Amino acid sequence: MSKIEVKPAKQLDEPTPPGAPEASAGVDWEQVRDWDQRYVFHVLATADEYQSNPVASADGCYVTLADGRRIFDFANQLICVNMGHRHPKIVAAIREATDKFGYVWEGMTTEYRSRAAKLIMEDIGVGEWAGRIRFLSTGTEAVENMVLFAKLYSGRRNIVTRTYDYHGWTNALSGANGVRGYRSSLASGSGDQAHVDVPDAPSANYHYAPAPHCYRCPIGHTYPDCKDESGTLACVRATEHLIRSIGPESVAGFLTEPAQGAGMIHPPKEYFSQIREMTKRLDVLWLDDEVMTGFGRLGEWFGYKVYDVTPDIMAVAKGLSSSSLPAAGVVLSKEVAEFFDQWRFNTMSTFGSHPLGMAAVCGNLEAMLEENILERVRDLGAYLGDGLKDLEERHSCVGLASGRGLMWSLELVRSKETREPFIAVDRYSTYTRTEETPASAIVGRICMEEGVAIGAFLPNSIRLATAFVATKADLDLGLAALDKGLTELDRYCD
């Protein structure tokens, strides 16, 4: 096996160089806005609320708007552009593939798919537990397949997931989302708080265990006093109670994220070792959704490695290709893979294993290995964590800064002592319009004025992520903008 050369990374305190060549010359942006406003189906806003915000280009950890403003992407879009926008090695791999391919279906083998599989199973070091990988096109499709694999393998119908988890947008998977507002529902923008759930969501076969949210425990405990005499966490005991109440023999799998991407919650260190012991003892598959956390986001190749456990089935996407082209996958344990090797699995994915997507995966993963990306993420993550902890100490509105690697969040509160959120509905929000402006939106607006985009979906939480190619100077820009936004929010604290 040829050894991949490790090249020195750009110094972490060097600023990101100026942006890409002018990409908007000759573009009539008013025409773009007009077509967008009139013809495109938009999400997260009613037709009256929607405002078109054209982007001319993106490079590294920045996006350039049509008006020329260059915005630091402190949300990493949807926590998905791990190696940054237009990484040169990924671009080169895609261009090479376009000279050879348009499209072939997954029943045909390409050099790119084989090399991508080898990179994941050997070079990235998934681990001895892993047997095979199936490539797909989106994270939702990957999780959908993971659930399907679990049900076929076990012959069982029920899936246990958690409150505040997020697993995808399909009609079936929306029932797995423990954040109510993320179930592909409709929310009123008129202020009357009307809300329409998909009629059959959540599905009767999805069941919610409590999230390991120690800052504001959903079942009323206080960490670490929530441990019993054996040291088992209350949320783990509650999860086992739920599975036993349903009947372990009817539960196909326990579906989780290592860090909750929508809820932005990192569990206590004991959580996953206790969960894994419990699922093995009850003979329930652990289904690991690594769509957001996979490929370096937490400073390890995968989130399960942070907790020294291994899953039965794992879904990946986003960081697999750094979202340069749609690509996703499902990794099966050796035991599960051996079972499916005996069957014809009657399903196809039109864009799964697309040769251009597979080329993007190869370029992306090879770049990560060459640039020793885990070391970089750990260094940048420690620097970002220190900066956010400093903001927590200095601002009355910040109750908690938590995270790992380049995936962090801020809990916004009226009072540090009582932990009272600004918006009472908090993570149970259905995203209807109310008279109250979400605390995160106040901070987000000011950050945008300062040239920084943050994740402000939850009313009392801010999620922060960046591309792995960011520098400490870039992070300083983001932290300074947050400082200004949080100073404004401090005015509303008790």
Image: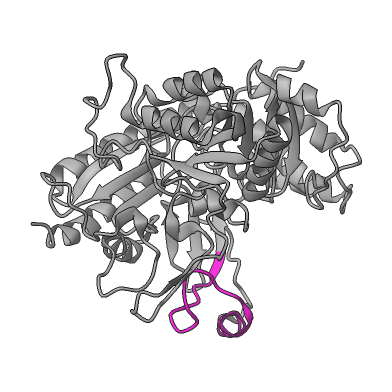
Pick the front one: 120 or 202: 202
In the picture provided, is 433 more to the left or to the right than 171? left
Res. 4 visible in picture: no
The residue positioned farthest toward the right in the image shown: 108
- Indicate the colouring scheme: one colour
Pick the front one: 477 or 203: 203
The C terminus is located in which quarter? bottom left
Pick the front one: 334 or 382: 334
Vertical placement of residue 74 versus 158, above or below: below
In the picture provided, is 145 more to the left or to the right than 302? right
Pick the front one: 285 or 120: 285
Vertical placement of residue 284 versus 474, above or below: above
At x 30%, y 73%, the residue is 434
**Residue 51: in magenta span:** yes
The N terminus is located in which quarter? top right
At x 44%, y 35%, the residue is 242
Residue 123: x and y in percent read 67, 22
Residue 460: x and y in percent read 28, 55
**Residue 251: in magenta span:** no
In the picture provided, is 448 more to the left or to the right than 70? left
In the picture provided, is 334 more to the left or to the right than 379? right
Residue 235: image quadrant is top left
At x 17%, y 52%, the residue is 420
Task: Give the magenta range.
Answer: 30-56
Q: How many marks?
A: 0
Res. 197 visible in picture: yes
Residue 118: x and y in percent read 75, 26
Residue 138: x and y in percent read 66, 49
